[in-house]
Amino acid sequence: MARQLRFTGTDSKVDGCPALHTDEGTGEIVVQGTPVTDPRDLAQLKHFGPDEAAVVVPRELLVNWGPKEMERVPELVDRDSFRRLFETFEHTAWRLETRRGYASDRQDPDYQAFLTTGSSPFDPEEPWFVNIRRQTQAGKKVGRVRIADNPPTTEQLFLLDYARHNAAVGEDIRYLWRQDAAQLPAEDFWIFDSRLVARLRFDAADNLLDIELITEPAEVMRYSIVRDAAMHGAVPYDQFAAQVAPTE
């Protein structure tokens, strides 16, 4: 059975080699680099088996991207601490949303209004909107990319309608069809100032279970790469809404 490899990182500025990958099943590290082929070099390697290969990588690659501990102990935070991140970030806050729906949305009265009327109400004095307006007016950037199914679920249509309210207070809301997001991980997360990640974990019923804070540089860089990849293909919410309209 083929390995399930996740790109871990590279120090290369041009072609992506050398690099490290992690086997998601075993946790083993796969090192990609220039092969050692000179018999005189190979003869100096101890315990080198006939079916083994040797590669050369810069020391910095292992220092910057190699695993720092055998088992990472998640740092979980409560909801209040998580909410404070949206008040204390300095430059950017960005989210990837990958699920087909969220239990919190289905419990929202605005969702029920959307089901009844086809439109969600807007309360500009809602705490989220008040804070995000304050942050964006101060020059900070807040954005999201949402992954949508084709056709979108009812919950996704609700959020698409609601996106105009987010945009009204300065959020940059963008969309990506799920078939165009195959290379992105199925993870929901916020990334703050490109230095701190809040990974959101949900159960099968779309309830938020816990929030893990990640500050390890290699892991934060991985999420930054995901952000850039998602933004590359995503389109503004109103443009996406025009694509969805004929299928409603």
Image (cartoon, rainbow, N blue to C red):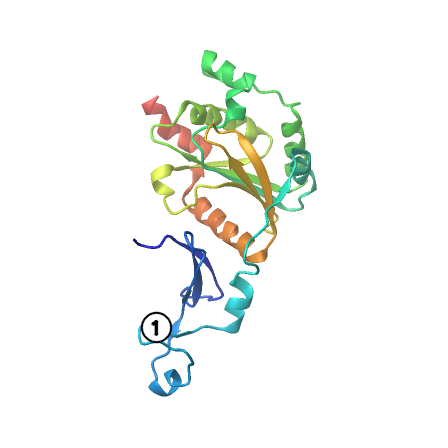
Q: How many marks?
A: 1
Residue in front for this viewpoint, 160 or 198: 198
Report whether residue 11 is seen: yes
In the depicted view, which residue is nearer to us: 33 or 123?
A: 33
Q: Is residue 197 above or below residue 146?
A: below
Residue 140 placement, left or right of 153:
right
Residue 58 percent location from the top left of the image: 49, 73
Q: Amino acid at mark 1?
A: Glu
Across and down, in percent, residue 216 comes to 59, 55
Q: Position of residue 141 (x, y in %)?
A: 60, 42
Q: Quadrant of residue 198?
A: top right
Q: Residue at x 40, y 44 (%)?
A: 233
Q: Residues within 10 Å of mark 1 (few under 14, many from 20)?
A: few
Q: Nearer the viewer, residue 76 or 60?
A: 76
Residue located 40% across and 65% down the image: 15
Instruction: Residue at 35%, 55% (x, y): give it.
Output: 3
As drawn, is 17 to the left or to the right of 109? left
Q: Is residue 190 left or right of residue 146?
A: right
- Of all residues, the one furthest to the top in this rendering is 116
Residue beneath label 1, please?
52
